[in-house]
Every structure is written in C-alpha cells, then in structure tokens.
Image (tube, coloured by chain):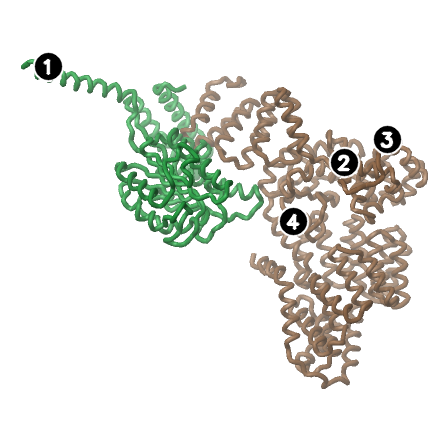
Amino acid sequence: MMRRANRYVLGAALRAALVVALFVALATPFAAGAQGAAASDRTARVTAAERSLLRGDRPAAAREGRAIVADYEQNGARWPARDRIAAGRAYLLVADGDAGAVRSALRAFDAAAAADSSLDEAVLRASDLFLEKYVAPDALQGYESVLRRRPGNAWATLGLARVMAFTGKGDALGKANEALAADPRLVPALLFVAERHLEAEHNDSAVAASRRAIAIDAEALEAWAVIGAVAWISGDSAGFRAARAQAERVSPRPATFWVSVSEAAARQRRYADAERFAERALDLDSLFAPALGAVGTNRLRTGQIAEGRAIIERAFAIDPFSLWHFNTLELLDVLAGFRTVRMGRFEFVAPAREADLLLPYLSPLLEEAYDKLAARYDYRPEAPVRMEIYSRHADFSVRTVGLTGLGALGVSFGRLLAIDAPSAREPGSFNWGSTSWHELTHTFTLGLSGNRVPRWFSEGVSVFEERRARPGWGATATPVYIAALKSNFLRPVSQLNDGFVRPRNQHEVILSYYHASLVAEMIEAEFGAPALGAMLRGWRDGLTNIEVFRRALKLDEAALDRRFDTWVRARFARELAAARTDMGTDSAVVGDADLEPLLAQAAREQAAGKDSALVLTIERILWIWPYDQPTHVRLAEAALRAGMPGKAVRERRAVSTLGPSDLLGARVELARALLAAGDRTGARRELLDVLEQAPTYEKAQVLLLQLRSAPPGAAP
Amino acid sequence: MKRAPAGVRMHRALVLALAGTLAGSLALATPALAQRTHLLVVTGLGGEPVYSDAFVRQGGALVDLARAQWHVADSSLTWLAEDVARDPRISGAATRAVIGDAILALSRRVAPGDVVVVVLIGHGSNEGPASRVNMPGADPTAAEFQAWIAGFSRQTVVFVVAASGSGDFATVLKGPGRVVITASRVYERNESKFAEQFVRGLASTDADADKDGRLTVMESFTYATREVAKAYESDRKLQTEHPTVSDSVLAARTVYAATTQSGDPRIVALVAERKALEEELERLRARKATMPAADYDKELERLVVAIAEKSVAIRALEGRP
C-alpha cells in the first residue's frame, strides 16, 4: 500500500515537480564562459554515448553519461550553455530508475537556456523531455516560445505535432508535414510521419517516409522498425527478414526494432505475437522500459494478470514517470479488490456489488450467445472467457488503452473482454447486454481468424450478431446514415477499414459500424450462412482480403463492392427516395439504449394487464439501466402474475442486492417468491435469516408458519 | 334527610364499586400508557420557495405522524414555523421568544420518564455555542437551547437539528438523558438532505430495522444516515454531510411512540413469555460462532417458531388477524 501511495503522489505531483525544477534552474546565478573550448568535445561525447545506447551498448552509454554528469556536478557552474545541454543529455543517459536524474536533466537544459536565451535547442530539449514525461502543457509552452522567436522552426513545429498526437487534438500529421516543409531533412519528423501512417494502416506511406529517413540517416533504426512492421503485417517474411538484418546492422541489439513490431502487432490485435516480439526486445536489453511495458501490457491483455503486473512493476521502476505504467498499476490495485466468479464458460471479474446484481442476467445471456455463435461459426473458444466489468469508466479506459478518456463501451482482446458496467455511464447511455454480446462475438471472429480478421469485418459481424440477438439491439439506420448513403459518403467494402482508422468526419466511425454490419448481413443473405465463417477461416489461413473474397464469395474486390452497393440501395430504396443528402449534426446511429420508449411501452402494457409482454419490456429496460429498485419490484410482481416465479426470484434477489431501505422486508418478499417457485428450502433459509435479526417481524413470522403448515409441494 | 347521607354513602360505595368494576373491565380493554411523548417542531426561514416549501412539508409530516403513530396528545404537540399562515397545523411563529415560551410550556406538562422530542429544520451555521438555525428575527443560539432544555432532567430529550451547519449543536447540547442528532459534522456547512430522509424514515416502516413495530431513535438515525449517503451516491456527488448522534446507547433504548402496556393478564403473560424466548434467542445468537451450523439452525428455527406462535396468540387476544 505504501508504494501505491507513493505512486499516487508521483502522478499528482509530476508536473509540479518538473515545473519547480524549471524555476529553480532559472533562478540559479549563472557563471558564463569559462570552459568554452571544451563545448564541442562534450557535445560530441554525449552524441557518441547516445549512439552507443542506440546500438544496444547500454553500459558504455551509461559510463560516458556518468562521467559527464560527474564533471558537470563538480564544475558545471562554469560551463557554457552548449555544454549544459550536453550535461542534460548525459543525465538522461543515466536516468533509468532515477527520477532525480530526469529532474537534473531538466535543470541543466533550463540553465543552458538561462545562460544563452538565443539557444533554442535548450528550450526544445526541455520541451521534448516534458512531453516524454507526459507534461504536455509545459512542452507546448516551450515549443510556442521558440516559434514566437523563430516562426517556422522545424523542431518546434514537430514538437507541436507531437503534442497534438499526445492530446489527440489537432492535425498532428499535417503539422509534422509543416515541419518537413521547413526542413525536409529533419529525420525525427520523417519518423513521426512514418509512425502516424503505420498507425493509420497507410502502410505504403509509412514505408515511403521511412525510406526518406534512411536516405538521410542510414542509422535511423526506428525507420527500419516501421519497414519491418509493415512487412510483418503484410505477411512479407522476406521483407521482414531484410528489415531486421538492416536493424541489426545499425545495432547488434536492436530492442527498439522489436518493440515497434510488437506495437504494430498489438494494433492488429495479435496480442500473442505482440508479446513474443516484445520478449525478443527484452532478451536484447533487459532494462529497456518500453520492452518491459509491451510484454507486461500484452500479458495483461491475454489474461496473465500476475505475470503482467510483475513486468509492469519492473518497467515502472525504471521509468517512474510513465503515465501508462502508473495508471496500469493503479488499475491492477483496483482490480485486486474485485470479485472473481467462475460461471459456466465464463470468468467474471467485477466489483462485488456489480457482480451480485449483473451476473444473474449476464451469465445466462453470454452462455446463450456462446452457444448460438458456436453453432453459427462452428468454433468454440477455449473456456473460460474472462470478462472484466468496470464501474468507473476511467478504469475501463486504462485497462483498454492505458489512459483515461477512451470513448468505447467495451473491448475484446480475444478471450479477455472488458466492459463498462452500466453504472459507469449515465442512464440511457448504452445497452450493456448488447455490448456484451458484441464483444463476445469478437472473441469468435478473432479466435476463428487467428486474430487476422480486419477490423471492419469483425465490427460488422459483431453489430450484425447484436441485431439478431434481441429485438431492438444493435444499430439501426438513421436519417444521417441514409443521407450518407445517398450522398455516396460511405466507403465501398474494399475500403471500409478506412472508415474506422481514418474517419473523415465525426460520424464516420459510427456509420461504418452499421455499414459493416450490413455487409455481414448481405454476405449471409446472399452467400449462405457458412460464408462469414469461411471468410474468417480464410484470414486465419493468411489470405489477403482479396484472396478471402475470391475463396469464400467467388468475387473480386470490385465485384463485391458493386454487389453490396446494389444490395444496400435496394434495401433502403424507399428511405433513399425520401432522404436528404446533408448529414447534418444529428446522431449518426440510433442505438439500443433509449429508455423513454420502453418506459412508455411498459406503462401501456401494465395498464392493459399484459403481464407477459410487460416482463419482456422491463427486461429490455434492465439491459439499459439495472439499478432502479422499483423497476425490479415491478418486474417481480409482473413475473409472479404471469406465472414466471423463477424470474420473480431473480428480481427479488436484485432488489436485495441494491441495498433497499427495508432490506428485511425485501428478503421476506424474496422468500415469498422462492416459495412460489417451489424452493421451500431457500424460502425457509431467508425467513430464518430475517427472523434471526428481527424475531418479532410479523410478515416473516406469518410466512414461516404458513410454510411449516403447508404440505410439501403445496403453496402455502 | 338522614337517609340522604346514607344514600349518599351508599351511592358513593356503589360508585366506588362500579368504578372498581369499570376500572377492571377498562383495564382489560384499554392499554395503560407507560410513556408519553411530546414533540416540538421548529421550521426556520427557507430563504427560497423551494426550501420554504420543503420545510413546511417536513414539519407537517412530523406533526401528522406524531399524532397518528406516536400517539402524541394535541396539548403536547407544537409546530412553530416561518409563516403561520402557511398551514393550519402550525401553532405559532418560529421566533426566539415563542420557541423559548413553547419549551417552557412543555416543561410544565412533562412527567418523569417522558420523551421530549425537539426537531429544528432549516438552514444552520456552525458557530460553537452561538450556532444557530435561521429563524424569523433574532436566531436562538445553541447555548440558549441548552439553557431552555436544562430543566428536563427527568425526561429523555431527543434533540434533532436537521439543518445544514449543525455539527456544533451536538457539542453544546449533549448531556445525560439526551440524544442529540445533527445533520452534519462540525466542519460541514453545505446544503443538507438529512431532514428529508429523517422525516421519511419516521413516516415509513422501513426504518424499523428489527421489525418489532417500535421505532427507536437509533433506528431512525441509522436509516436517515444510510439514505443520505445513498442520495449523494445516486446523484454522483461527493457526500458533504455526515449525520451524528451523541449517545447511541440511549438512542437505541428510546422509542418515539408512546408505549402502552396491555391490561389483559393473558396478554401480559404471553408478552412476557415471548420476551423470554427473545432473550433465549439473543443468547443463542451469541453462541453462533461456537456451534455446528446445523445445530444452530435447528435451535434457531425452534425459537423463532415459538416466538411466532406467541405473536399469533397475542394478536388473537387483541382481536387482530
């Protein structure tokens, strides 16, 4: 616990600590000049040491770094500004596991800036360091200050691009291209562009930018990493081997190369491969924090919680400023307090209260989903499938991407699913039943395809399966979708993945989910039920999209595009005839979490005495918001009237779980429902428990006496 | 004329005899009052219609439930409020002088063993002995309330400050024979949800945790505390008030409703037998951890069934189903 407290303080105080360091450095009297002759020597020495580190010779880099630091700490007050920058860089060479060295580096950069205010490099290196340690506002301030003095400065412009990428605000790629316009030979900008393209699955552009970087700096290891990652993703083993050989030429221990490939594999949801690649990096450099982080994160994604945690602990010890690792360790502490419940083919991990309330609904739903999906796709994922349920969205977000702020509701890493509990969101925000069904479908599509299914197809099948799971589940067409279809905004099947990874407006991702689900629906309708499974097996066999289409559907890309376009326009012919072409700002897709119509429907059914229908409607309400006690009571009463005592029991248990004002009263009602369901033993247990606490409670006494006097099998 | 006195005497004897008979039959039919409860409700300045309305609603609910559920006599029931015209049940203005007079009047009516319940509802402020709840005109302070209730030394005083910024009242008012309940702790000042939940608990049977039909002060406090927490949780807000109780032991012993004792010796006997069984159950519960579960359950069932059968018999004699 103590260590966790320290982490917490660190997280909160990180920015303050670095900023304090900045002001201390600025306030320190500076003696300029004395050993100017040695400046170029120290810069050359630290550059050489950085090269040693790049080549995997961590001891040599640290040795030289320590020597420069020791010199600086003894005589630095007389060092010129450029040497102070070299000192800052040297501190970073010895900063593994030493937060103090990071602060000293920042002080050295700031001292350099104070000594020579025209020296942009000092400010830029301090800003880079701030950003590397996740203090984006201060980094931004530094870059902007340089740009005010020197408009168009390429390094500072690249810094802005990095801040944009970090914060997710602004056109990071465009800004990086601005930097390249100012300095076409700026290798870090080329690498940044290459990585952005790789993330967006623009593989050709990623390779092109990497090759430009290599043409300028043949030792740009990260560029070979991008080329290697693209080759691996494309299944180009020769290309991958060539890139790896080049990386090994630059560095005999190219841990960076393997980490980059690992990250690319994780983006493709091939977590086992990602873990394997990260382990290769770790074999080469056991202290390389990004490698430790990648191994740990992927172990966590594959459900190896204890093993993942141990590795992340090591990574955090080396890089105590890492927000990802800090958040993840905090989350794992939270997770340790959750309850783990094995039910059938599932292992649920959730806060105790959520587990008590949600699992009686979720477990049967997922068992049903498993059976239906297994029959449909002729595939049975290995049990147990683990589902984590988070009652704080921030925890779910950290579990998913390491940071807070993720917009998603659920995620599937294969046999590990994570979702927001309904309590993590406002009532009416999402349907936790359809979301669970959606994520479990990914378990099937990922597993059956060996994690090679493209995102658009996996999402499309998941939404399609939601839609046929229950009435009203899954996305439906809205005027925005129809307008997008009419205006030819939506992408053809062959380019549908871009709708997820390179959206052109705020609607496109959500529209693409629905559009992709219609592709799945069309394939099943036009090519037969086994077609979807056949496609997944095609990807599993390493086929490209084109090959999959040919093998499973006997169509080439263009033909499939045409076939779907014709199908979807026929399906929505009436809507298209009446539709506008302006998408406007309305919600793109009406989901399955709208409470109001269901509440109105329930009121009508109750008034009409249609108890069976009322039961179904209230159950739909509970898949949106299960925390309202009166709703459970209403369902329990309707279920009893409709002759469904089992459901009445479930609902009475839910009422007790929700912490009613009158718990004993709720337990007596549970006993009554148990009796109605023929469970005399359960009813007797409840009543004895109640009367143990409240021996003169009349309602419980009467029911107990009735239970004892009624013959077995008879209702009292 | 001489006969007259004899006649008078005879008449007196007859009257006495009849009285004895009547008393006997009344004793059979009418329960004897064992404890009387007196209630003073003071609802303060609302400041805004939403608060004024809430205070009147809560004050009215208290008066009604005191009359109906606690069997408080009208003469022992006083509601002072910001605006006397708001509700016919309001007895007078909630000014400092009227409040002081009301407590003085109450002190003349009480008997030893009675329970005196004072409930202040409004906006308060923590200022040590000068703590107050806003009333029309000068506000009475906690120190003044302390002086006014000092005379209730042979009664149990339940003093509830269901107001924001009420924590300091507990420090000033607490003492032997008193239960002081405040909506918040000493340093908490924000708007209070306590009064709403406290009144709701008194008005419903939900707060009666052991379901014995006798709501204790502690049960009502526990209920309100739990419901206040739930209200903040449901609103997804940080809880900024934490109710306090000064003497939980006395609070657990003190019931709001005037208690009665049956005059029917058969009922008295059954109640005593049931009480003995409850005590036996209490002893059993104390041994629970040391007993095999099956043995415990068997004995538990025997006792709760026996208690239930006594209750059935009592209800039958009382003419209740």
Residue A670 point in image, percent of width and height = 53, 28
Residue position marked by numbered label 1 in the rendering: B7
Mark 4 → mark 3, Cα distance in angstroms: 41 Å
Element at label 3:
helix
Q: Specify the amino acid type for callout 2.
A: Ala
Mark 2 → mark 3, Cα distance in angstroms: 16 Å
* Viewer-side label of 1, 3: 1
Mark 2 → mark 1, Cα distance in angstroms: 99 Å
Apparent colour of chain A: brown
Using a 10 Å C-alpha cutoff, classify the residue at mark 2 as few (fewer than 14 neighbours), some (14 to 19) or many (20 or more).
Answer: many
* Residue occupying the far front of the picture: B85
Using a 10 Å C-alpha cutoff, classify the residue at mark 3 as few (fewer than 14 neighbours), some (14 to 19) or many (20 or more).
Answer: few
Residue position marked by numbered label 2 in the rendering: A475
Residue position marked by numbered label 4 in the rendering: A395
Element at label 4:
helix
Quadrant holding the C terminus of chain B:
top left
Q: Which mark is residue A419?
A: none
Q: Specify the amino acid type for callout 1.
A: Gly
Q: Specify the amino acid type for callout 3.
A: Arg
Residue position marked by numbered label 3 in the rendering: A571
Against A616, residue A258 (above or below) is: below
Q: Chain of mark 4?
A: A
Q: Specify the amino acid type for callout 4.
A: Asp
